[in-house]
Image (tube, coloured by chain):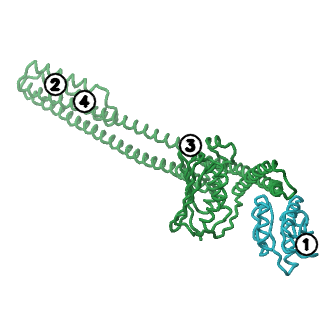
Chain colours: A green, B cyan
Amino acid sequence: MSIQLKLFITTATAISLTLILGAALFLTTQQVNENRAKVLIVDEIVKKVNDLNTLTLELILHPSERIKEQWQIQHQEVDMLLSEDNFKSEEEQRILGKIIDNHNSAKPIFTDLSEASPSSQLSTILAGQLITRKREIVTDAYNLSNLERSKSINVREQFNLVLAAFVIAMISLMFSIIWVTNVSIARPLSKLNKAALEIAKTKSLTTTLNISSNDEIGQLAESFKTMLASLKEQFEKEKELDRSKDEFLSITAHHLRTPLGTLRWNLELMLKDKFGKVPASIKPHLTEMSESNLELIGLVNELLNVSRINQNKVIDHPKPFVVADLTKKVIDGLKYIAGQKSVSMNLDVGNVDGLTINLDIALFSQVLQNILSNAIKYNKDSGKVDVRLSKTDKTLKIIVMDTGIGIPQRDQYKLFTKFFRSENAINVSAEGTGLGLYVVKSYIERWGGKVRLESQENKGVIVEIELPILV
Amino acid sequence: MKKILVIEDNKQYRNLLKIALEGEGYEVETAENGKIGLEKVGIGEADLILLDLLMPGMDGITFYNSLTNRLKKHIPIIVLTNVTDADGYGPNIKSVLIKANVSIDEVLVEVKKYI
């Protein structure tokens, strides 16, 4: 059954119950009011009958035409009260009938009494009969009044029963609403939520979600699963595509190495006159060719690094080495390009002198090279690059500071992503793959370290690396 | 005169290495793949082998395994390849160099270490 239907049924039941209660309340009130009106009539009758008795007694003691007239008027008023069509039940009709009989029989007695001579025995007897009739009427009237009162009480009691039933029904209805909400909505929703959170956390598109209900949430769960399956399929396809792309990249790069390598060696031997004397005017061009070739080789290596990172094929060959010495070696290797821009490079080994760490030397050199070549490439002419090493018990810290163009705030968060180059970097040099820092971050994190970057535009960049010291 | 066997399928690399090594006064023997390499080792033993990995016919790894089975004497081997992450082939392999990433001078320096 759908949740909508369940909720509709419970709501409809609640509304009907409320309507029933309202009707019962209305009927009860009406009944009570009616009874109250009847009681008032009866009370009025009793009052008037008592007045008639008083008038009768007065007539015996002080007979006068005025009293007779008053009696007649009162009697007629009682007639009117009795003729009102209010009393319908059998019991009421029976008592009312007695009252009417007594009342009607009173009139001829009164006529006789008014004609009999005052203070005669007859008048006393008649007056006695009259008063007896009237007393009977009063007694019956009291009975009628009590009947109406007890009826009111009955109606109220019935109403109380209806009210109690209503309260019980409403409470069970509320419980059923809570139950429907909990079992059909809250619990499966929380399951669904858990499944979604799990996916967000584990980043795996599989789920153990089990909601078997046939309602909207059951359908939602089914759609959720179908969506996951199609997403998974899509991701698999994309992954496959990515894999083939990385494989293609890797194969192409490897193939490129062969001609680039032979070109390198050919140029090298040529420059050394190994194939015969090369004219001096040609040599600078050979050097340029050689430099371009080295650039190409660097590019290919960078692509290979990325494809290895992407394919999870980075292999470390950790060997112990002296950090300060290797850093110095990398700096020395870059002195030539630094010299071209008159950038000075300083190394402060701090308390790290002699510290040995156990990492892949080639990969570590690559990290330093990438950061330092950026620091030189994007520096100002005659700028400075400071490299500071320091350590604590467990951490090696490498800080590289330059005095270059810096990185605009808006670009900083993207710096460690693949192929990203900041706009001002592109202005300085159109060439560059945007892979250097991506590679740095991948390797540093692979070794359990952290890399952070701070920069102000036109002031320079500070790169800070923290690595756990693994000996 | 020390004898070096260059096993390399690429003709250009083979010739460049031959020229450079002969320039340093070594006697150089060349082979286009592992199979020919094994034959040449059999004829006149080499003092050092420069070995490429990916070659048609017989690749460098198969060559290395056959060689270690056949010879009692250990010949130092320097692997010259363009395939990355060549590693862990055995005690005779003294170093692994990526051809595109080293100058021929660096190859010569490495050769001198083991001969």
- Is there a contact, CB below 8 Å, between mark 2 and mark 1? no
Residue A260 vs residue A31, the one in the foreground: A260
Provide the secondary structure element on which disc 1 rests: helix
Picture coordinates of residue A141, whole percent (x, y): 23, 34
Pick the front one: A387 or A157: A387
Residue at which label 2 appears: A110
Q: Are marks 1 and 3 on the same chain?
A: no
Asked which quadrant contains residue A333, the reply is bottom right
Tell if the residue under mark 3 belongs to the same chain as the one under mark 2: yes
Disc 2 crowd, CA 10 A, few/some/many (<14, 14-19, 20+): many
Instruction: Give the percent coordinates (x, y) of residue A317.
Output: 69, 67
Q: Which residue is mark 1?
A: B38
> Which chain is disc 2 placed on?
A
Q: Is residue B99 left or right of residue B57?
A: left
* Residue A382 - label: none
Disc on the earlier residue, 4 or 3: 4
Residue drawn at x 70%, y 50% is A235
Q: Secondary structure at mark 4?
A: helix
Looking at the image, is mark 3 or mark 2 nearer the viewer?
Answer: 3
Residue A41, labelled with which disc?
4
User: Quick check: do tags 2 and 1 share a chain?
Assistant: no
Which of the two discs, 2 and 4, labels the residue nearer the N terminus? 4
